Amino acid sequence: MTLPGHHRPGGGFRNPPGSPRQTATWRDFLRFLLVDMRRARPPVIPPGHIAANPPDLAALPADHVSWLGHACFALRIGGKLVLTDPYLGRTAGPFGLGPKRYVPPPLAARDLPRCDLIVLSHNHYDHLDSGALAHYRFKADTPVACPLGLASLLRKAGFANVVEMDWWQHKLVAELDVACLPAVHFSGRGLFDRNRTLWASFGIRSAQKAVWFGGDSAAGTVFAEIGARAGPFDLALVGIGAYEPRAIMQASHATPEEAVAIARAIGAKRALGSHWGTVMLTPEDPFEAPVRFARAARDAQYGEANAITLPIGGIAAI
């Protein structure tokens, strides 16, 4: 049996052909860890970055989305409430270690309503938050869609219905067409498990609307293929932050300009920026991302009004 190209012989996974490669040296990594990130300080939060009131997710209107920070969104699509990458803890790491949030989540994991579906893109701590999953009260009722290799962790966390998927697979979950699609990234939660589990983006489609959830991804030629095979989409939830230094991040995180190109390539009518304004992962000013995102959409003739950013807890139409 021939393995798909993104499966490594002997186990593990790799990015699609045409993906950018990391060009950093060990000196670049040392500078990033010992100089850039040590100098980085939590930013001053600009007015309007946090919504005045937390969203009532149980009453989220049909075909609307709420941003809960970073890559965590709640979608009401096809009458179903979908939650993506629920990072709602204080740190993005194990045992209270790791990068710290500088903006609190708009609600605690224990206060989440019952969701019809949780979608997890990969196993990094700022996306797969074990504490948030532990405090979610409806594990027996809510199915989880995830890439290959994550089912055992999620079942240990108490989720009874885990739908593990490979790239390009479609499954009907919670009466929604869920497609597991490629992304350009990597995985790992420790020192010895790099790329042992798969990373992914997801298409979530009802009879009326289609949303692409990018999870965490760099740019790459694969997005034109996603557009041709799985698009178009009404809305792309696309990462726009954590992109410096480029020698390190170009293989795993898109710039705001690349995010616009990704949205266009997959055939998204509009794009909503994610993966910014929440936690200090990289040393750039986190509040330059939405400015560059809007400018890039204008310059690329995508339409500045089609490149949306929300306050944390804010709501927009799909």
Image (cartoon, grey):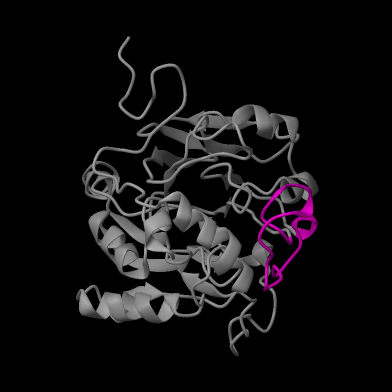
Tell me residue 125's x, y (percent): 63, 49
Please say whether residue 2 is visible from this viewpoint. Answer: yes
Q: Residue at x 36, y 49 (%)?
A: 22
Would you say 94 lies left or right of 256 here?
right
Q: Name the foreground residue: 231 vs 72.
A: 72
Would you say 273 lies left or right of 156 here?
left
Q: Residue at x 51, y 45 (%)?
A: 121
Question: What residue range appears in magenta?
Answer: 90-111
Q: Is residue 106 magenta?
A: yes
Note whether 117 is above or below 154 in the view shown. Answer: below
Q: Is residue 86 magenta?
A: no
Tell me residue 248's x, y (percent): 42, 55
Q: Quadrant of residue 166?
A: top left
Give the dominant element type of the magenta stretch: helix, strand or loop.
Answer: loop
Residue with the most extreme front position: 27
Tell me residue 306's x, y (percent): 33, 74
Q: Residue at x 59, y 32 (%)?
A: 150
Quarter of the N terminus within the rendering:
top left
Would you say 130 lies left or right of 285 here?
right
Residue with the most extreme bottom position: 47
Would you say 184 lies left or right of 311 here?
left
Q: Name the foreground residue: 51 vs 1.
A: 1
